[in-house]
């Protein structure tokens, strides 16, 4: 007497295919995750380098401010009025330099994130340019840097005044 057992392997084959497909998907997802992790490490390295550069750039004007402030606090009374005024101007210049560096770093960050959205309004280009120049005129004179600007008529245009100001200040 013989006994036979018949198994239906169709279900097993379907399960094997599902398992194979799932393994393939997991391998692909693992590769994507590893690639994303590598990109994240590169971005973190870039961020660290950026912070190092920013720290180095800001350290110089800050050192000037700290040193001259300490000198004025300790020995300022011994300086002539002209020397004190010169020292105050140097302090002011260093603070302007720091301010510009900080604005530039923040703008780089905003540009990379794509979050700079110009706000277009009617602006008198001549008036705005003259006001920017006036802020830097004293510094330029002390550094013997000539500034030439000619423009007397009103020139109203549609633009982002803040972005324009940053461009002119950087120049």
Image (tube, helix red, strand yellow):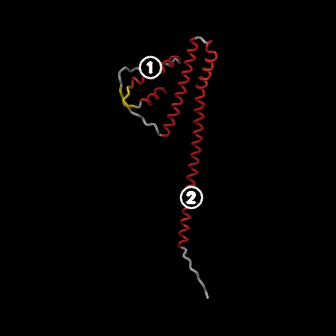
CA neighbours of label 2 inside 10 A, class few (<14), some (14 to 19), many (20+): few
All told, the count of numbered labels is 2
Circle 2 SS class:
helix
Query: Residue 31: x and y, percent?
Result: 57, 54
Q: Mark 1 points at which residue?
A: 148
Q: State left or right for residue 70 relative to residue 96.
A: right
Query: Residue 87: x and y, percent?
Result: 58, 17
Q: Please give the name of the residue rendered at 56% of the width and 58% of the height, measured from the top-left corner.
A: 26
Query: Residue 164: x and y, percent?
Result: 43, 29
Q: In this view, does 73 lie above or below 117?
A: above
Quadrant of image for the N terminus: bottom right
Q: Which of marks 1 and 2 is in front?
A: 2
Q: State left or right for residue 27 relative to residue 167.
A: right
Q: Are dots 1 and 2 in contact, CB under 8 Å?
A: no
Circle 1 SS class:
loop
Query: Residue 29: x and y, percent?
Result: 55, 55
Choose top left, top right, bottom left or bottom right for residue 55.
top right
Q: Is residue 98 above or below residue 108?
A: above
Q: Please give the name of the residue rendered at 45% of the width and 37% of the height, measured from the top-left corner.
A: 116
Mark 1 or mark 2, earlier in chain: 2
Which residue reaches farthest right?
74
Q: Mark 2 points at which residue?
A: 26
Q: State left or right for residue 160 relative to residue 24.
A: left
Q: Please give the name of the residue rendered at 59% of the width and 11% of the height, measured from the top-left corner.
A: 80
Q: Which of 166 and 143 is in front in this view?
A: 166
Q: Please give the name of the residue rendered at 51% of the width and 37% of the height, measured from the top-left corner.
A: 109
Which residue reaches farthest top?
80
CA neighbours of label 1 inside 10 A, class few (<14), some (14 to 19), many (20+): few
């Amino acid at each position: 007497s013989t006994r036979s057992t018949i198994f239906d392997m169709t279900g097993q084959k379907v399960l094997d295919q599902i398992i194979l497909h799932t393994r393939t998907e997991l391998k692909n997802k693992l590769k994507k995750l590893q690639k994303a992790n590598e990109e994240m490490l590169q971005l973190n390295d870039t961020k660290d380098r950026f912070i190092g550069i920013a720290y180095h750039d800001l350290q110089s004007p800050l050192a000037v401010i700290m040193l001259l402030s300490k000198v004025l606090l300790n020995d300022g009374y011994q300086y002539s009025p002209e020397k004190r005024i010169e020292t105050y101007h140097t302090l002011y210049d260093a603070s302007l330099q720091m301010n510009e560096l900080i604005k530039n770093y923040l703008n780089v960050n905003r540009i990379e994130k794509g979050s700079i959205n110009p706000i277009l309004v009617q602006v008198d280009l001549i008036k705005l340019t003259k006001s920017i120049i006036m802020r830097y005129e004293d510094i330029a004179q002390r550094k013997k840097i000539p500034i030439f600007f000619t423009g007397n008529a009103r020139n109203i245009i549609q633009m982002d005044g803040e972005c324009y100001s940053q461009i002119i200040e950087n120049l």
